[in-house]
Amino acid sequence: MPSLSSVFEFEPYYYGPYSEDLDRVVSQLVREGYVTPDPYAFVADGRARLGSSFSPTDLATDEAKLFLQSLPAEDALRLMAVVKQYRFEPLPRLLDYVYRVYPEMAKNAESRSQA
């Protein structure tokens, strides 16, 4: 199974790695009804900021199940392990992980501690 970094090119950005191509794909998934944006607000550097997380729709869940069934068992298990491990991680913990494993992605970060 290819890694995310082999499919999308990432660059350091305000709160960690950013991919313009991935951003386009997510926007398309929203337009096509596969994911729903969940906007949220947070404070960083004393300023209110807006962000979005994304939730799969029923359509996406149904198609994901079909996709998993089409994969070799080993690949499906690896994919599900990643989902299980990170699905409910809050953004600050995910960012801490990314900054620890990929420190070059933190060079443009505005505020790690309050993201």
Image: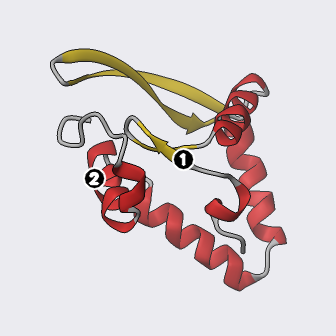
Q: Which residue is mark 2?
A: 93
**Picture quadrant of residue 77:** bottom right
Which residue in the structure is indicated by mark 1? 11
Residue lying farthest to the bottom in this orientation: 74
Query: How many marks overall?
Result: 2
Across and down, in percent, residue 62 comes to 74, 48
Which of the two discs, 2 and 1, labels the residue nearer the N terminus? 1
Residue at the far right in the pictured view? 70
The answer to which image quadrant residue 36 occupies is top right
Q: Residue at x 44, y 54 (%)?
A: 87
The answer to whether marks 2 and 1 mark residues whose Cβ atoms lie closer than 8 Å is no
Amino acid residing under circle 1: Glu
Amino acid on which the number 2 mark rests in the picture = Arg
Task: Name the spot of residue 81 as percent of width and height, x first.
Answer: 51, 72
Where residue 84 sits in the image (x, y, percent)?
A: 46, 64
Q: Residues within 10 Å of mark 1 (few under 14, many from 20)?
A: some
Q: In this orientation, does residue 51 appear? A: yes
Quarter of the image with the C terminus in it: top left
Residue depicted at x 40% and y 57% = 104
Q: Nearer the viewer, mark 2 or mark 1?
A: 1
The residue positioned 63% from the left and 60% from the top of the image is: 4
Q: Residue 67 vs residue 102: left or right?
A: right
Q: Nearer the viewer, residue 62 or 83?
A: 83
In the image, residue 64 sits, relative to residue 40, either above or below, namely below
Answer with the quarter of the image where residue 74 lies.
Answer: bottom right
